[in-house]
């Protein structure tokens, strides 16, 4: 009963997420550049959703850092993501698209999922509903706020640098 009450409080906005943030009405993204998040570059693996999660991030080039993600459950790809952090004017935005295991897109052709920059710290970047934190040179945590069927949950992806 207590957890149901917390979920209701959370989903109605009475309690905010622990690690993810949102811009408030009228708030603009802060100034930032790709060099400030270049620590994300690398090949990262961890466990999530009962499977193996993998992200590969490029170095900044051409006003972006591109990435690919895949989730493997029971030896098969459950889904992919492809996207980038893009330098947009004086700030950053993270954009992505989802694909099933057969590369069929989830979003419409010209639609992306967009995460605007909320806040930037030396080893932590907060996008709307997605936070990335450098724990060490070989560890990174990513929290994603997932909304599904009226339920909102913050999921932790605890990554280690792939060898």
Image: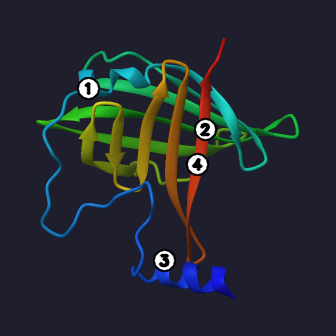
Gap between marks 4 and 3 measured at Cα: 17 Å
Badge 4: residue crowd in 10 Å (few <14, some 14–19, many ≥20): some
Quadrant (top left/top right/bottom left/bottom right) for the C terminus? top right
**In which quadrant of the rendered view does residue 87 lie?**
top left
Q: Are marks 1 and 2 in contact (CB under 8 Å)?
A: no
The residue at which mark 2 appears reads as 158
User: In the rendered structure, which disc, 1 or 2, sits on the residue that comes first in sequence?
Assistant: 1
Please state if 108 lies on the left or on the right of 77 as rendered: left
In this picture, residue 69 sits left or right of residue 22: right
In the depicted structure, whether residue 2 falls above or below residue 48: below
Q: Earlier in the sequence, mark 1 or mark 3?
A: 3
Kindly identify the residue that appears in the image at 30 percent across and 15 percent down: 61
Q: Mark 1 falls on what kind of element?
A: helix
Give x and y (percent) for residue 56. 54, 23
Q: Quadrant of the N terminus?
A: bottom right
Whole-angstrom CA distance, mark 4 to mark 2, is 6 Å
- Coloration of the structure image: rainbow
Mark 2 vs mark 3: which is more N-terminal?
3
Residue 10 is marked as: 3
Q: Position of residue 23 (x, y in %)?
A: 24, 61
Question: In terms of image quadrants, where is residue 15?
Answer: bottom left
User: If you read the primary sequence from the N terminus, does the residue marked by circle 4 or circle 3 appear first?
Assistant: 3
Q: Secondary structure at mark 2?
A: strand
Which numbered marker is on residue 156?
Answer: 4
- Work out how far the residue at label 1 is from the one at label 2, CA to CA, in angstroms: 21 Å
- Give 103 or 2, whichever is nearer the viewer: 2
Q: Given contact means CB atoms under 8 Å apart, are the residues at marks 4 and 3 in contact? A: no
- Residues under labels 1 and 4: Cα distance? 22 Å
Cα distance, mark 2 to mark 3? 23 Å
Q: Which mark is residue 128?
A: none
Location of mark 1 (residue): 36
């Amino acid at each position: 009963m207590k957890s149901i009450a917390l979920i209701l409080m959370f989903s109605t906005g009475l309690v905010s997420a622990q690690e993810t943030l949102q811009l408030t009405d009228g708030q603009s993204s802060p100034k930032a550049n790709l060099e400030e998040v270049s620590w994300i570059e690398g090949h990262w693996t961890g466990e999530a959703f009962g499977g193996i999660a993998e992200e590969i991030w490029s170095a900044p080039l051409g006003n972006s850092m591109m990435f690919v993600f895949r989730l493997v459950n029971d030896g098969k790809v459950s889904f992919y993501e492809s996207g980038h952090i893009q330098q947009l004017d004086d700030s950053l935005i993270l954009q992505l698209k989802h694909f099933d295991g057969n590369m069929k897109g989830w979003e419409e052709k010209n639609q992306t999922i967009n995460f605007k920059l909320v806040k930037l710290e030396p080893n932590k970047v907060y996008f709307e509903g997605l936070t990335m934190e450098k724990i060490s040179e070989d560890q990174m945590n990513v929290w994603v706020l997932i909304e599904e069927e009226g339920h909102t949950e913050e999921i932790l992806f605890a990554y280690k640098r792939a060898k």
